[in-house]
Image (cartoon, rainbow, N blue to C red):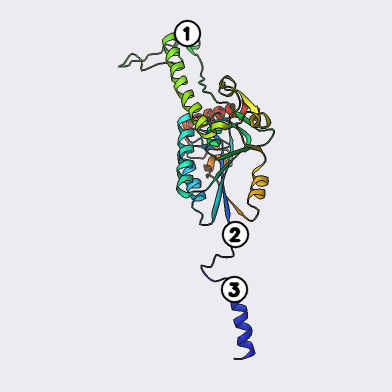
Amino acid sequence: MSERASVTEKLVARLPRIGDRSDRGPVVAVVRLHGVISPTPTPLAARGVINATTAETPLTRAFDHDRLVAVALAVNSPGGAPTQSAMVAERIRELADKRGVPVLAFCEDVAASGGYWLACAGDEIYAHSSSMVGSIGVVSAGFGLAGLLERYGVERRVHTAGTRKVRLDPFQPENPEDIAWLKDLQGQLHEQFVGWVRQRRGGKLTGTDDELFSGEVWTGLRAKELGLVDGIGTLRAVIGERYPDAEIAVAAPKRPLLARIGVGGPGMSTADRILAAIEAVEAKATWSRFGL
């Protein structure tokens, strides 16, 4: 064998073989769940929208890594639609149980209401000391516009089949029966939220029911004292300590193009622009509740 051939063989021997993954380390997949939780995409929302549709692709990608040792949820959400919150959380648990890996949730600026519902999908929850955590409650909000119509001499005409088809119509005076119905509905949703928190947090909760489930929001430090989170720490710090040799792979839902550029496109109708603007204002108002 020539000296040249010997050198070539040595070089080839040092190259990684196709399909040889023995020298590749473990992976911690990070899923970013940032935004208001809503079934409706908001084209102009600067911070994105979370729902079962937008979360599906990043979640399945995250749990599909062949070297996966854990999944981290980076939660930054003021909440929103309860059904979408439940569907995304249940999907996380379904994938985690199927893959058999731990899920660590990290509360960033805020994990409140539906945002905390998502965080509870984690086997462990961490928060920054200044994070806003909790808001285990249900809220409905709207406007009463009956006086506005009367002031401008506008007559509203609504025709229905079914006496309860127009409950809580903002253009009509409030009906005590409708308010009682809404309170009952909110109570049912609240019970489901409380049941989910109890199921996921179990004996870790230390506060009283009146304190924990009042809809109050706490800092990360206080949330730890109440058992709502397991520890204080950031995603990078906790993952770096727990899995020092792991590669971090980030998966995030794609935001609509209009959200990325912050303006309406040329093909957008005036009505769509108005609707998108209203939805963007509503999303901003939801964040503003927490000073964000």
In the rendered structure, which amino acid carries the disc numbered 2?
A: Gly
Which dot, 1 or 3, sits closer to the camera?
Answer: 3
Find numbered disc 1 in the image and state the secondary structure of the residue it sits on.
helix
Label 2 and label 1: CA atoms lie apart by 69 Å
Q: Earlier in the sequence, mark 2 or mark 3?
A: 3
The residue wearing badge 3 is: 15
**Residue 87, position in %: x, y?**
45, 36
179 to 195, vertically: above or below: above
Q: Residue furthest bottom?
A: 1
**Residue 284, position in %: x, y?**
59, 29
Find numbered disc 3 in the image and state the secondary structure of the residue it sits on.
loop
Name which quarter of the figure residue 205 lies in.
top right
**Residue 102, position in %: x, y?**
54, 46
Name which quarter of the figure residue 167 lies in.
top left
The residue wearing badge 1 is: 150
**Residue 152, position in %: x, y?**
49, 10
Label 1 and label 3: CA atoms lie apart by 81 Å
